[in-house]
Image (tube, rainbow, N blue to C red):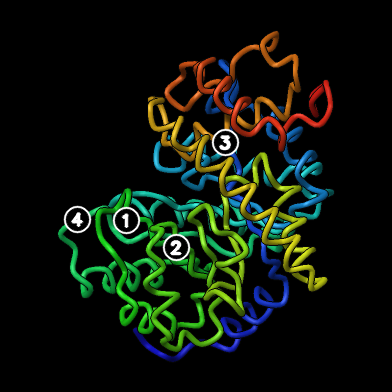
Amino acid sequence: MSATGSASDNVRKDEALRLADPLFVPVLTDYAPGAKGGVDAERMLAHFRHIRPHVRQVMLAGSTGDGWELEDEAFDALIDLAASDIVADLDLSLLFGVLRGETEAVIARLQHLEARLAKDDRLAARVSAVAVCPPVEPEAGQERIIEHFEAIMAASHLPIAVYQLPQVTGCHIAPETFVRLAVSPRVTLFKDSSGEDAVAKSGLDFGDVALVRGAEGGYLEALKPAGPYDGWLLSTGNALAAPLRRILEHKAAGQVDAAATLSSQVSEAVAGVFDAAQKEGGANAFSNANRAMDHLAAHGRGWRDAPLPLKVDGNPLSRELIEAAERIAGSLLLGEDSGYLG
C-alpha cells in the first residue's frame, strides 16, 4: 500500500476526523411490501427522528441493516432515503456499508454509490466514508486482504472505513496488515466487530485512523484512556442510543462510577437479548435483536397490538423474541406507555 496521497485526500481525511463523534450507529433497514426495494422509508425516517437527539452519525446498509443481503434496488432505496430533504434536515453524518463477498462485487456497488453521489453534491458532502470488509474467503491470507483493499481503492475515491468482521468473512486482518492499510490517507476509520480487539490492543501505530468498537458489552472499558478505542459503532444504538449517550456524558464529566454502573446495566441487558436472538432465523443476530428492541421502543407497552416487523427474508420477527427483549431489557426501553410511533 502506497504511503502517498493527494492533497485532496489528506484534506478529506482531516475533515472526517474533525467531524467524528464517539458514537456511530449502523441503522436497521425497515421493510414494507410493495415499497421500492421493499424498504419502508417512512418507518426508517421515524426511527431516525427518534435516535437523532443522541446520535449524529449513522451507517446505512451495514450488517445490522442487512447490507450483505440487500439487492441493488434496496440499496438504491437507501441512497434515495439518505438524499431526502428530511434526512438532510436531521444533519446526520452518513456512512454506507458496501458489503459484498468478492472484490469485484464491492467495486461495482461502490462505483454505483459514487456515481449517485456525483449527481448530488449535497448528499455527497454528508457521506463521510464507506465501510468495506475483507473478502469473504476463510482461506484468505494477509497479502490477499491487502490486494483486495488496494483494488477497491484504485477503483474508487471515497474514504474507507476498514471493517473487521470475521463472523462473516471467515478471515482476520492482522494488526501488522492494518498498519499497512492505515498508511493510505483514504483510510479514516477501523471498525472491529470480532470481539477479539487484536488490532486495537496491539499497540502498533495506525497514524490518525480512528478506532471504533463494533462488539457489544464492556462499553466504558473499551474507550480510551482505559481501553484502546476512540469510540463505538454499535448496533444497539438503534434502541439504546439514550443510555449509550449518557455513558459518554458521564465519562466526559468525570463521573466514572455512574458511567460504569450504566455500562454494566446495558451490557447485561444486551447480552441477554443477543443470546435470545441466536435462535431467530431470517437475518443475522445483530439485526434481529435490535429489531426486537426497536419494536418495543416504537410501540411501547402496546407493542402486541402493532404488526410484527419484517426481517430481510420477508418473514415477521417472532413474538417470542420481542417478549424476551421486553423481559430482559424492558427497563431500558419502556419508560412510557406509548412508544415513539405512538
Classify mark 4: helix, strand or loop: loop
Query: Local crowd at mark 4 within 10 Å, few (<14), some, or many (≥20)?
Result: few
The N terminus is located in which quarter? Answer: bottom left
Marker count (numbered): 4
Instruction: Give the residue at x 63% y 77%.
Output: 12
Q: Amino acid at mark 4?
A: Pro
Alpha carbon separation for disc pair 2 and 1: 9 Å
Q: Nearer the viewer, residue 121 or 89?
A: 89
Query: Which residue in the protein does label 2 denote?
Result: 192
Q: Position of residue 81 (x, y in %)?
A: 67, 40
Dot 1 corresponds to which residue?
166
Please determine whether, in this image, residue 94 is positioned above or below residue 203: above
Labels 4 and 2: the sequence-earlier one: 4
> Badge 1 local density, few (<14 within 10 Å), some, or many (20+)?
many
Q: Is residue 182 left or right of residue 245?
A: left
Image point (59%, 31%), residue name: 328
Looking at this view, is 132 or 191 the one in front? 191
Q: SS of the residue at dot 2?
A: strand
Give the left or right position of residue 163, taking residue 261 as reference: left
* Along the line of sight, the residue nearer the viewer: 284 or 137: 284
CA gap, disc 3 and disc 4: 27 Å
Instruction: Give the crowd class for mark 2: few <14, some 14-19, many >=20 residues within 10 Å.
Output: many
Is label 3 in contact with label 4 (beta carbons under 8 Å)? no
Looking at the image, is mark 4 or mark 1 earlier in the sequence?
4
Residue bearing the label numbered 3: 290
